[in-house]
Amino acid sequence: MNDNQAYKSGFISIIGRPNVGKSTFLNRVIGQKIAIMSDKPQTTRNKVQGVLTENNAQMIFIDTPGIHKPKHKLGDFMVRSAINALREVDVILFMVNAVEGIGRGDEYIIEKLEGIKTPIFLVVNKIDEVHPDELLPLIEKYKEKLDFKAIVPISALQGNNIETLLAAIKEELPEGPQYYPADQVTDHPERFIISELIREKALHLTREEVPHSIAVVIDSIKKMEGKETVHVMATIIVERSSQKGIIIGKQGSMLKEIGQRARQDIELLLGSKVFLELWVKVQKDWRNKASVLRDYGFREDEY
């Protein structure tokens, strides 16, 4: 770092309706998987903080749950969490989907952004999926609705224009301290990321059969005696017995597949061999029970 160059740091909130690619973007920027990805909406439940440290700046990204119309207490929590993330950040990235155009969810978010003094960037994602001629009319529509500090079209999947966006963000950051060690990429404990990796595999493999009524609780993580292996015990929570049957699968085949796929990601995260033991438990209507939500880590007092 140049001694004459001031160190910059700050917090960047990523907001947008479900499935616009917020988690894909975060993982691309950080360079490893810390946010789970699914083509189902409402995958992200808690605010995920990713930390990018460069030689003259540190950017702390907050990936929020997608804005959607709540259908249960968990949904209420998710939307409140996303809106609250707009407070006390240095830059807001409003991410939209180039393929789908402006939707009612975008209109709702724009309403929430009106009057906010924080610099707001319009980030048009998935440009690799549309013809360039389609981009300009879409951008013009958004410009009519809000005065954006910058507009950056990107492909989070392909990496197009990511560096341009990061440079623009850095320009807006104030001088500040390095909040996290240079090698730290998230403020979430490993326990949280492991539970999210397991939940991602369950979502991918069960597709439409099991909606977002899945939670994962890590029961224990410990080094196996005399071995370079970490023993992880986790419980997958579902709302109905029929869902339990789907998660377990015929002769345990689905649970085994979930475990095998999750174990590979967990080994990459921990840098060691992992023995993963999964259980499935029915907790009826857990998404509507405040006390159960708290037990599963959805703590409103953190926001």
Image (spheres, helix red, strand yellow):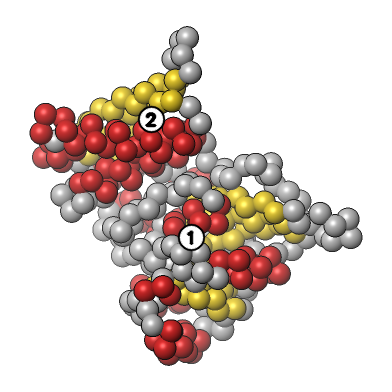
Rendered image: mark on residue 25:
1
Which tag, 1 or 2, sits closer to the chain's start? 1
Point out residue 200 in the picture as x, y percentages from the top left corner: 33, 45
Rendered image: mark on residue 218:
2
The image quadrant that residue 239 belongs to is top left
Q: Nearer the viewer, residue 243 or 182?
A: 182
Q: Rounded to the nearest whole Å, what is the CA distance between mark 1 and mark 2? A: 26 Å
For residue 183, say whether it is visible: yes
Q: Residue at x 46, y 14 (%)?
A: 227
Rendered image: mark on residue 248:
none
Is the residue 139 above or below the residue 98 in the image?
Answer: below
Q: Residue lying farthest right?
A: 4
Q: Residue at x 44, y 22 (%)?
A: 230
Q: In the picture provided, is 89 more to the left or to the right than 20? A: right
Q: Under tag 1, what secondary structure? A: helix
For residue 240, say whether it is visible: no
Is the residue 13 above or below the residue 298 in the image?
Answer: below
Evaluate if marks 1 and 2 touch, with contact meaning CB atoms under 8 Å apart: no
Give the quadrant of the N terminus: bottom right
Q: Residue at x 67, y 51 (%)?
A: 53
The image quadrant that residue 13 belongs to is bottom right
Q: Residue at x 72, y 56 (%)?
A: 57
Q: Nearer the viewer, mark 1 or mark 2?
A: 1
